Amino acid sequence: MNSDHPRETKYATLVHELAHLYCGHLGTPNESWWPGRRGLSDAQVEFEAESVCYLVCERAGLRNPSGPYLSDYLQENDETPAISMECVLKSAKLIEQMGRERLKPREEKRGGKKSGIQ
């Protein structure tokens, strides 16, 4: 994160990167947490992350670069990439929740036992 950027830009960057994680672009340590969705095109990955960023930042009343990115994409392309609206909306919901409250660590089941993920 660029320390010279304003707080809104830093927050938008954080939301965008978390969107990559929770949309499954980086895989998943546990399919019950979020789906692993590696192998998507660059257009799909970026459109999903920018969509999450746009929703979260707009709902928080923050200016963000996602609006122009999405608008420019639609002006330059005939179609939107085949994205998962379910992943976009679930990721936005989780990131908004993380901004409002401290969430409990997720637990992973191992051999019938639960162990906290740190």
Image (tube, rainbow, N blue to C red):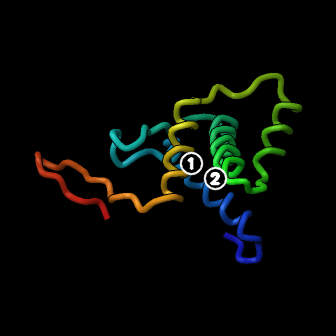
In the rendered structure, which amino acid carries the disc numbered 2? Answer: His
Vertically, is 84 above or below 112? above
Secondary element under disc 2, as helix, strand or loop, is helix
Q: Name the residue under label 1.
A: 20
In the rendered structure, which amino acid carries the disc numbered 1? Answer: His
Q: Which residue is at 35% across, 39% downward?
A: 31
Vertically, is 77 above or below 7? above
- Quarter that holds the N terminus: bottom right
Within 10 Å of disc 2 (Cα), the crowding (few <14, some 14-19, many 20+) is many
Vertically, is 118 above or below 63? below
Q: Picture quarter containing residue 89?
A: top right
9 displayed left or right of 28: right
Contact flag, marks 1 and 2 (Cβ < 8 Å): yes
Secondary element under disc 1, as helix, strand or loop, is helix
- Quarter that holds the C terminus: bottom left
Q: How many marks?
A: 2
Within 10 Å of disc 1 (Cα), the crowding (few <14, some 14-19, many 20+) is many
Q: Which residue is at 83% across, 31% downward?
A: 74
The residue furthest left is 112
Q: Mark 2 points at which residue?
A: 16
15 displayed left or right of 66: left
